[in-house]
Amino acid sequence: MASIAFIGLGNMGLPMALNLIKAGHTVHGADLSAEQLSKLEAGGGKAAGSANAAVGEAEIVVTMLPSGREVGMLYLGENGFLSVAKPGTLFIDSSTIDVETARKVADAASAAGQLMVDAPVSGGVGGATAGTLTFMVGGPDNAFEAAKPFLDIMGKTIVHAGGAGNGQAAKICNNMLLGISMIGVCEAFVLAEKLGLDHQKLFDISSTASGQCWSLTTYCPVPGPVPTSPANNDYKAGFAAAMMLKDLKLAQGAASHVGASTPLGAAASQAYGLFVGAGQGGTDFSGIINFLRGED
């Protein structure tokens, strides 16, 4: 069994770390929240004195951090993770960050004699708890093969997207598509309401017709047709609007950097920016339907 340092025990990181513990690995966790560290210890993990102390003793390091700024600072800063880790340490960064930072850190890891993959996730807190996440992985073949047994514990679908940064590229492309499609589904239901068409009737038709998509059939933004969707729980966040906005902004930054035309992605980013700006950042991203109705 491996000695693992897990840095970042938030809503996603903690259940991921707990699944590694359940599989028999030793996990030393680091987080700014004493409450999250206590939960890790209750699940059989160990609270590290510091992130660097955990990294220095680990064979594998998993990071789940808020943004590229934190990733760059913690990995590359003076006495950063890459400088205190033992040679040959495997780093798995599951943060969702910009592609440029992911590739910069990966290059530094390679130069330091470390293995590294960027492995952002999809599947939300439910997937993290159940161990059914999708990992989109970027990095060299040998790093991917080393990481896969651990990713298999935390996820169900593991896809090697290519070289360093390609995991992040896949994540932001996917979530841009998701944000656009959710707004489209919401607009369809709002129009149906104005035209006097019942929610269930529209769902029954579109879910089996050319309008079918995940945002409709799995995550329907109106109560009723899909009982497990957040719409049936007052839009309690499975995937918060603020997180969707973060990913859409990352996609727009990447599009600008490479000169890609993404007008619908830009429109989705603007819409979610207004929704979050109205105080709805903690609401599920499907709750934007209320904003489109003019209710928020």
Image (cartoon, rainbow, N blue to C red):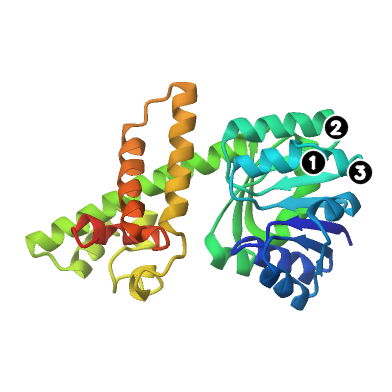
Numbered disc in front, either 3 or 1: 1
Q: Amino acid at mark 1?
A: Gly
Choose between 75 and 205: the one closer to the eye.
75
- Label 2 to label 3: alpha-carbon separation: 10 Å
Q: Residue furthest bottom?
A: 42
Please state, as top left, top right, bottom left or bottom right, where the C terminus lies in the image.
Answer: bottom left
The answer to whether residue 123 is left or right of residue 294 is right
- Dot 3 or dot 1: first in sequence order is 1
Query: In the image, residue 58 lies at what x, y percent?
Result: 87, 53
Q: Amino acid at mark 3?
A: Lys
Choose between 177 and 66: the one closer to the eye.
66
The answer to whether residue 58 is left or right of residue 181 is right
User: Mark 2 — residue?
Assistant: 112
Please state, as top left, top right, bottom left or bottom right, where the N terminus lies in the image.
Answer: bottom right
Q: Tell me the residue at 89%/49% (across/down).
A: 56
Can residue 163 be seen here? The reply is: no
Q: Are marks 2 and 3 in contact (CB under 8 Å)?
A: no
Q: Tell me the residue at 80%/70% (across/down).
A: 45
Choose between 101 and 199: the one closer to the eye.
101
Numbered disc in front, either 1 or 2: 1
User: Mark 1 — residue?
Assistant: 80
Assess disc 1: are there few (<14), some (14-19) or many (≥20) residues with their C-alpha within 10 Å of its C-alpha: some
> Could you say which disc has been placed on residue 86 in the image?
3
Assess disc 3: are there few (<14), some (14-19) or many (≥20) residues with their C-alpha within 10 Å of its C-alpha: some
Can residue 233 be seen here? The reply is: yes
Query: In the image, residue 175 lies at what x, y percent?
Result: 46, 46
